[in-house]
Image: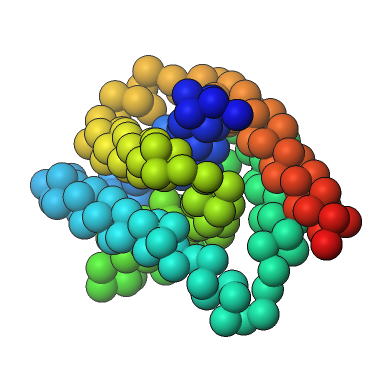
Amino acid sequence: MSHGTDWLTALVMLFVTIGPIEGAVVFGSLTSHGLQTGRAALARRAVLIAGVMLFLFGVAGARLLGLLGISIPAFRIAGGLLLFLQAMTLTFASPGASSISRSEQSEAQRSGDMAVFPLAFPMIAGPASLSAIILLVDRAQSAWQLAGIAFALTLCLAATYLSMRACEAIVKLLGRTGSDVVGRVSGILLAALAVQFALDGLREALRL
């Protein structure tokens, strides 16, 4: 697989699992009552915290799995299934559905620092995106591919921050129908990538 293809795969998978557009909609909803003046700082903290979590999982995720006695083929299969479930949620969810539940949104309104919960986790650095970064890093076979993954992650985090800053304009531009279309197309792409990871895990497990 070429470096360009690997970079594009990483970009698509991270963009879909992090969900800058979905994040902007949720961010706008959570900050619609009395938090408009602090949106820039809140978005910046959320993205920085999530970015640190994702980079740490990329660097140390495989070692953590080893300490837990989880093989990489097993995680590829499990991660592929998890990403596939996320893809089904994106594809078949009702318009405007988000990755965080209503109870989490209600809890966020009472929490001391919304940047940590639910913005950084589980909205940006959720189970799907954390699994994706571990799978992508494990699949990389050269320093160039690792650099491409890091660049793709940085682009996705930057897009998430910019989307949060422009949340009102994005909601007004897309509306429910536009958000629904973006979510369903993203779900189809993620489903294909998830199946590929699961097949890679099965193939390697059978080889072992």
| Residue drawn at the location 44% of the way across and 39% of the way down | 145
Q: Is residue 184 left or right of residue 37?
A: right
Q: Residue 14: x percent and y percent?
A: 48, 40
Residue at the left extreme, as displayed: 37
Q: Residue 28: x percent and y percent?
A: 33, 41
Q: Residue 178: x percent and y percent?
A: 51, 20
The front one of 165 and 171 is 165
- Viewport quadrant of the C terminus: bottom right
| Residue drawn at the location 67% of the way across and 80% of the way down | 69
Using the rendered image of the protein, determine whether residue 12 is visible from the camera's viewpoint: no
- The quarter of the displayed image where residue 196 is located: top right
Considering only vertical position in the picture, is 84 above or below 7? below
| Residue drawn at the location 54% of the way across and 37% of the way down | 13
Considering only vertical position in the picture, is 192 above or below 76? above
Q: Is residue 35 left or right of residue 82?
A: left
The front one of 183 and 169 is 183
- The quarter of the displayed image where residue 120 is located: bottom left
The front one of 56 and 26 is 56
Using the rendered image of the protein, determine whether residue 150 is visible from the camera's viewpoint: yes
Considering only vertical position in the picture, is 187 above or below 42? above
